[in-house]
């Protein structure tokens, strides 16, 4: 079973090998093992969550995490007009399994990586919106999700994309200030 994932956007060209050369020594200070997989991605387990800002958190119950290239970014069907510079490369930070501990650790890991890379975070969905998305709703869920996002500090954008059925939908992309606030919000802990 795979778990949650978020994207990190890079706004200047950078080889994935260079990203790994920067990330691996830093990750090895609080993760073990940190291994490059056969496909070129990175696999890791967090052994000490305190460098991520989680003081009283035992990562022993969490699964493994992964860092890989996002081969689909940038995409022709996505609207990047909310950004002064569109992304030129994407990374994916993912958890190997779901659950509260994995969501929380993934969020803090992504926040630390986004800070190091100076990148926005692609939440790969609409925060606060029920999943799976049901197009038969009256708009209440979407209004509630937008109000939630608007209540948090930082910058967040709605990035629209083609749904494949001649429609459009969007996902949230936010800065590190927004992600830090989302991680502290009580609704974040409802994610499982």
Image: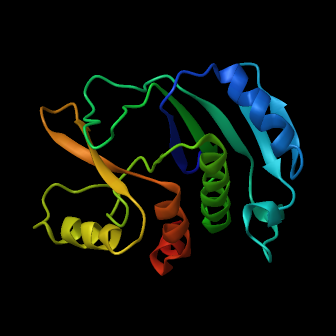
Report the front residue among 52 and 131. Answer: 52
Placement of 9 over or under 54, stated as above or below: above
Q: Is residue 7 visible?
A: yes
Q: Quadrant of residue 81?
A: top left
Q: Looking at this rendering, what residue extends furthest in the front direction? A: 84
- Res. 41 visible in picture: no
The quarter of the picture where residue 78 lies is top left
Instruction: Identify the residue at horizontal 25%, vertical 35% (top origin).
Output: 79
x 43%, y 25%: residue: 72
* Image: 49 above or below 2: below
Residue 30 % position (x, y):
87, 53
- x and y, in percent, of residue 117 in the image: 62, 40
The residue closer to the viewer here, 165 or 69, is 69
Identify the residue at horizontal 68%, vertical 60% (top origin).
105
Residue at 80% across, 77% down: 56
The residue nearer to you, when weighing 79 against 60, is 79
Q: Residue furthest bottom?
A: 186
Above or below — where is 131 with respect to 25? below
Depicted 103 relative to depicted 186: above or below:
above
Q: Is residue 30 left or right of residue 104?
A: right
Q: Is residue 137 left or right of residue 3?
A: left
Please give left or right for residue 83 compared with residue 66 in the image: left
Residue 180, x across and y down, in percent: 55, 66
């Amino acid at each position: 079973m795979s778990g949650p994932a978020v994207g990190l956007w890079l706004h200047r060209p950078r080889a994935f090998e260079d990203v790994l050369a920067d990330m691996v020594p830093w990750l090895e200070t609080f993760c073990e093992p940190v291994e490059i997989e056969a496909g070129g991605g990175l696999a890791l387990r967090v052994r000490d969550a305190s460098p991520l800002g989680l003081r009283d958190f035992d990562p022993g119950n969490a699964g493994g995490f992964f860092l890989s290239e996002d081969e689909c970014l940038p995409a022709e069907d996505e609207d990047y007009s909310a950004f002064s510079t569109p992304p030129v490369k994407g990374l994916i930070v993912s958890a190997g399994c779901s659950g509260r501990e994995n969501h929380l650790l993934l969020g803090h890991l992504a926040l630390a990586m986004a800070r190091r890379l100076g990148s926005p975070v692609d939440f790969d969905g609409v925060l606060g919106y029920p999943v799976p998305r049901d197009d038969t709703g009256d708009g209440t869920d979407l209004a509630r999700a937008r109000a939630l996002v608007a209540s948090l500090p930082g910058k967040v954008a709605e990035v629209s994309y083609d749904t494949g059925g001649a429609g459009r939908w969007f996902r949230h992309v936010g800065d590190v200030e927004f992600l830090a606030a989302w991680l502290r919000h009580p609704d974040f802990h409802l994610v499982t």
